[in-house]
Amino acid sequence: MKTSRRQFTGYVVGSLGAAALSHPFISKARAAGPINVFMGTTLDFANIWIAKLNGFFEREGLPQVDIRLFPSGAAASDAFRTGEAHFLGCGDLPAIRMWKTIGSKYISPISRDFNFNVMVVKSSIKTPADLKGKIIATQTASANMFMVGLINKKYGLQESDYKVVNMEPTDMVIALSQGSIDGFVWSSPFDEKAKEIAGDKVHVLLRGGDVNYPNSVALSVRKELAQSDPETVQRFVRGLAAASDWCMDHKDEVNRVVGARIGLPPQAKSTITHTNFRSTIDEQLYLYLFGLGKYMESRKLLDAPIDWASYIDSQFLKKADPGRVANMPAL
C-alpha cells in the first residue's frame, strides 16, 4: 500500500499539532508568560520533552514551556527568524546560520549520536562506489551536507559522481519508496519508516559513525532574551541539564514517553541507544564544531571564519555546573 506525503507527515507530527504557540514572543521584552521552543521532530530532542513533561522546567520556575514542532531543525530555524520563539533546537549548521543572521547564541548541546544519521539507499546499491550516477536527497541547508562531504572524502567520490537534491524529510521516504530517488541522507527513525514502507527494497548503507560524523543538536537562545532576562535562560538551561542526566539513566522510559508523544512506532527505540543527552561542552564537541566551521567556509556558506567565543555562550551551563564546560582548545 502506498503511503502519501500527507499520511507520513501525520505519522511524524500528527499528535502534536496542538503544540502551536499560545502567545507571540516580543523579542526585546522579558519572558513573561509561556516560554516558546521551536525544534525538530525526532528523538534526539527528547530531553527537552522530558524537561517539560517530567517537571524539570516547572521545578525551575518555568511552568509553561510550549513546544512547536517542525519537520526538521533546519525548518525550525527558518521559522525562528520571525521572533516568535525564545529557544531553538536544531542541528549545528542551521544554528550557526542563525548566529550569523540574527545573532542568536549557542548555549548548550541537546544531544550527540554517531549512530543517528543514516544513508538509506535502494538495495541494489551495495557499496559507496555504487552511488555514481544516482540521485540522493537530503536537506542541503542542514549539517547532513557535512556528512555527505565526509562520505565523499572517505570513499574517494567526487561531487559530480552523483546528484544531491534538496527535499523535506517526509518527502525523502516517499520518494525513495516510489523510486524517484535512489537514497537519502537523514536521521533515524526515517530509516525505519523507509523499511516499513519499502521493505527489503531499501537498506542502510552507512551511518554517521562510519565517517566519524555525529548527529549533533544545538540549543540556541535569542540574543535579546539572553541580554534582557538572563535568569529565565539560566532556569531553562538548569532544567534541561537535569532532564538530560535523567534521560541517560532512563532511555526505555524516554523512548516510551517521547516516542508516544511524537507518534513513533515501538521499533524507534533503537534510535536513541547510542544517544548522548549529557549537557556538556567538551573537547570532542569543540573539535567537531571547528571541523564543521571549516566545511561551511569551504562551501562558502560563511563570508568569514566563525568567532567561536562570540557564538558559544557557555556561561549559563557553567553556572549550572562548572564541570559541564571544558576550556575551548586553540584552533
Image (spheres, rainbow, N blue to C red):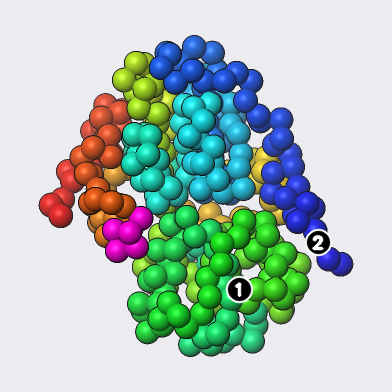
Left or right of 310 on screen, residue 202: right
| Quadrant of the frame with the C terminus | bottom left
Q: Quadrant for residue 294, please give it.
A: bottom left
Residue type beneath disc 2: Thr
Q: Does the magenta stretch include residue 90?
A: no
- Amino acid type, label 1: Gly
Q: Residue 183 carries which label?
A: 1
Q: Is mark 2 on a helix, strand or loop?
A: loop
300 magenta-colored? yes
Q: How far apart are marks 1 and 2 (CA)?
A: 17 Å
Report the number of numbered marks: 2
* Secondary structure beneath label 1: strand
Question: Considering only vertical position in the picture, is 154 above or below 188?
Answer: below
What residue is shown with label 2?
A: 3
The answer to which of 308 and 194 lies nearer the viewer is 308
Query: Is 268 displayed left or right of 223 in the figure?
Result: right
Residue drawn at the location 70% of the way across and 36% of the way down:
16
Q: What stretch is highlighted in magenta?
A: 297-301
As drawn, is 306 to the left or to the right of 272? left
Above-or-below relation of 261 to 292 = above
Picture residue at 52% right of the left edge, 20% below the top: 25
Would residue 110 be found to the left or right of residue 191 on screen?
left
Q: Where is residue 103 drawn, in percent x and y? A: 34, 34
> Residue at the spot x=58%, y=31% of the render?
67
Q: Which mark is residue 120?
A: none
Of mark 1 and mark 2, the one earlier in the sequence is 2
- Using a 10 Å C-alpha cutoff, classify the residue at mark 1 as few (fewer than 14 neighbours), some (14 to 19) or many (20 or more): many
